[in-house]
């Protein structure tokens, strides 16, 4: 949100400066500074998105490592216990795969969509994490 406000403010300043036909050296300098500031804001937003993506990737990698352990327990289980464990595992695997697919798109979204994407990813992670916690008892 803050990035958007700064970017809009800088863009408005730039539009005002561009609208002047005879630019003084001060105006040219100000225009250059506005462009540089806008670029810095965009770079910071991109870096923030990448940090978030990397953080979420680490979480899903950890979840998948735990799921691999659970898969071994499923292989050793017998009868109804095995069937029940496999159902929970399959549901978790589907959620993890969906999460990973969505995670690939995190860095590709525009600034304006970032808040919505981040909110959706946070909810998806909470859903996956809660499901992992629920299933953990079955794999002890």
Image (tube, helix red, strand yellow):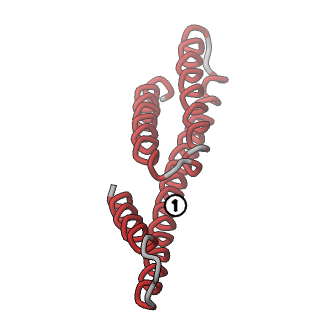
Quadrant where the N terminus is found in the figure: bottom left
Residue, x 61% and y 19% (percent of image)? 77
The image position of residue 29, as x and y in percent, is 45, 86
Asked which secondary structure carries label 1, the reply is helix
Going by the image, does 66 lie left or right of 34?
right
Residue 112: image location, x then y, percent: 44, 49
Q: Mark 1: give few (<14), some (14-19) or many (20+) Cα within 10 Å.
A: some
- Foreground pick, 131 / 79: 131
Q: Which quadrant of the structure image shows residue 89?
A: top right
On the image, the x and y values in percent for residue 123 come to 40, 35
Q: Can you give x and y, in whole percent of width and height, for residue 13 in the image?
A: 37, 70
Residue under the point 50% across and 47% down: 59
- The answer to whether residue 121 is above or below residue 84 is below
Toward the top, the furthest residue is 80
Q: Which residue is depicted at the point 45% across and 79% down? A: 31
Q: Check disc 1 and report the residue beneath it.
A: 46
For the point 46% across and 72% down, the residue is: 18
Query: Number of callouts in the render?
Result: 1
* Image vertical order of residue 60 relative to residue 91, above or below: below
Q: Is residue 106 above or below residue 97?
A: below
């Amino acid at each position: 949100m803050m990035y958007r406000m700064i970017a809009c403010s800088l863009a408005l300043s730039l539009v005002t400066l561009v609208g002047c036909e005879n630019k003084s050296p001060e105006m040219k300098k100000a225009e250059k500074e506005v462009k540089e500031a806008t670029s810095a804001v965009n770079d910071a937003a991109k870096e923030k998105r990448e940090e978030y993506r990397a953080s979420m990737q680490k979480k899903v990698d950890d979840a998948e490592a735990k799921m691999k352990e659970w898969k071994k327990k499923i292989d050793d289980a017998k009868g109804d216990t095995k069937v029940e464990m496999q159902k929970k595992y399959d549901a978790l695997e589907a959620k993890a795969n969906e999460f990973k697919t969505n995670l690939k798109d995190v860095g590709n979204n525009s600034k304006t969509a970032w808040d919505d994407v981040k909110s959706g990813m946070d909810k998806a992670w909470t859903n996956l994490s809660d499901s992992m916690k629920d299933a953990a008892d079955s794999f002890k």
